[in-house]
Image: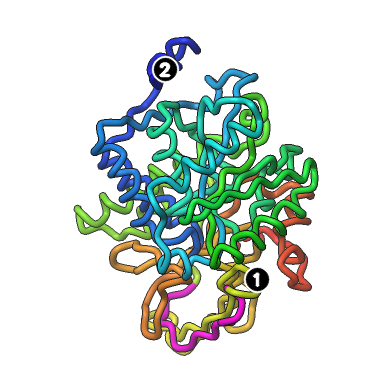
């Protein structure tokens, strides 16, 4: 059954075909919203591009059209972004994971959904959807990127990460089924990824269509798409990309964004054992102010993604709110896995989606969820 036959069976005629130009825009937008993490976007983009070149199609639908009783899954990668760049995936690794999940559950997937807004994990869901001839849903579990698989709106609203399957390039697969214990699922999946060499390819959160509608961040892929389009337009028309980014997020989400610092990286302190010992890229960077911020200093902590930013010692943003370091002239995101001494950029802060700001969400992926002895304060309250 093709994707169009599925949509006909569901009586859906409102859909969007994602072509190569759209994939490029969505990849850029998702990379910006990935808050310094999300891995090398070229990996996801080139994978999806190859699927399109084989004559398959990526079709996106709104979550409201998804039948309640179907099975949806979130394919992606898990581990340290630095390792991902060094160990690109094989062509079969995701299909091995999804086929194993289908065998274990005894059910066929009828749609995919991105785990997060990330340069790799957003687009992998598109590629997998085209590969299996099913639609990809305009939603995800974060509307940003986070380092742990239990840090999702799905988990905080009662949906579970397992059964899940983890695979590696050699053909190995591991089935994880921890029932309702998502923290244990994260721990096991992380250990499996480390056993695979620091990165694994997973399919997680086998959701029903009803769960997708009730627990996802809805419309997240459209938000990423609009962000990517706005920045690309700014490049073509020689506009200011950060101003265009702020404008489009006000239009699509009705949220204020804040550019709170412009500077260059003058110090990088990486925990080089964290990839092997914990399955994350971790550390802290220091930025020295330039232009209007000359004489000021910013410090950012990261665990795959930027988590906390302080300017002259004052906290400016805490998780789950988003921190992006963007090239001031191009809007290109500066990721934690590729940053270098001397890189220059503007720090932009974006409020997290409301489904990520619940009390349960703040408990799991607020400051204390990452080990910081700080109470969560919304970015709007800090900066206004």
Identity of the residue drawn at 64% across and 26% down:
106
Q: Secondary structure at mark 1?
A: loop
Q: Where does residue 33 sit, x and y in percent of width and height? A: 48, 54
Residue 277 picture location, percent across and down = 65, 75
- For the residue carrying disc 1, how many other residues have a C-alpha within 10 Å: few (<14), some (14-19), or many (20+)? some
Please give the residue where the numbered disc 2 appears in the rendered image: 1
Q: From what the image shows, is residue 359 above or below residue 268?
A: above
Q: Quadrant of the N terminus?
A: top left
Q: Which residues are magenta?
A: 261-275
Image spot of residue 373 (x, y percent): 78, 73
Q: Which residue is mark 1?
A: 278
Q: Main secondary structure of the magenta part?
A: strand
Q: Report if the CB atoms under discs 1 and 2 are less than 8 Å apart.
A: no
Residue at 43 percent across and 51 percent down: it is 30
Decide which of tag 1 and tag 2 comes sooner along the chain: 2
Q: Is residue 380 visible?
A: no
**124 magenta-colored:** no
Q: Is residue 153 above or below residue 43?
A: above
On whether residue 273 falls in the magenta region, the answer is: yes
The C terminus: image quadrant: bottom right
Q: Is residue 289 above or below residue 173?
A: below
Circle 2 crowding by C-alpha within 10 Å: few under 14, some 14–19, many from 20:
few
Which residue sits at x=66%, y=24%? 210
- Residue 91 appears at what percent x and percent y? 38, 48
| Quadrant in the picture for residue 238 | bottom left
Residue 134 appearing in the image: yes
């Amino acid at each position: 059954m093709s994707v169009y036959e599925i949509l006909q069976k569901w009586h859906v005629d409102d859909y969007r075909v994602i072509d190569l130009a759209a994939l490029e825009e969505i990849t850029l937008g998702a990379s910006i919203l990935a808050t310094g993490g999300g891995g090398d976007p070229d990996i996801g983009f080139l994978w999806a591009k190859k699927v399109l070149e084989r004559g398959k199609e990526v079709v996106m639908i709104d979550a409201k059209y998804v039948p309640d009783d179907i099975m949806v899954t979130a394919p992606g990668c898990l581990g340290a972004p630095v390792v991902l760049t060094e160990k690109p995936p094989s062509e079969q690794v995701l299909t091995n994971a999804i086929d194993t999940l289908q065998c274990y559950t005894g059910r066929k997937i009828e749609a995919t959904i991105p785990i997060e807004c990330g340069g790799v994990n957003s687009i992998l869901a598109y590629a997998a959807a085209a590969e299996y001839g099913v639609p990809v849903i305009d939603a995800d579990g974060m509307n940003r990127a986070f380092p742990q698989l239990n840090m999702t709106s799905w988990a905080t609203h009662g949906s579970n990460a397992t059964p899940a399957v983890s695979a590696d390039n050699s053909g190995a697969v591991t089935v994880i089924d921890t029932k309702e214990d998502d923290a244990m699922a994260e721990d096991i999946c992380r250990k499996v990824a480390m056993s695979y060499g620091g990165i694994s390819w997973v399919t997680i959160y086998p959701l029903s269509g009803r769960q997708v509608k009730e627990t996802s961040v809805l419309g997240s892929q459209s938000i990423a798409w609009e962000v990517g389009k706005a920045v690309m337009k700014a490049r073509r028309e020689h506009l200011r990309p950060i101003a265009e980014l702020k404008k489009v997020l006000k239009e699509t989400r009705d949220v204020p964004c804040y550019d709170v610092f412009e500077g260059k990286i003058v110090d990088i302190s990486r925990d080089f054992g964290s990839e092997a010992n914990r399955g994350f890229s971790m550390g802290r960077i220091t930025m020295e102010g330039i232009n209007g911020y000359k004489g000021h200093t910013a410090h950012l902590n990261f665990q795959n993604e930027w988590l906390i930013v302080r300017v002259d010692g004052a906290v400016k943003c805490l998780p789950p709110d988003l921190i992006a370091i963007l090239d001031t002239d191009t809007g290109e995101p500066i990721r934690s896995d590729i940053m270098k001494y001397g890189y220059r950029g503007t720090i932009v802060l974006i409020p997290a989606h409301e489904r990520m700001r619940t009390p349960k969400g703040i408990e799991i992926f607020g400051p204390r969820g990452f080990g910081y002895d700080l109470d969560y304060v919304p970015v709007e309250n800090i900066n206004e």
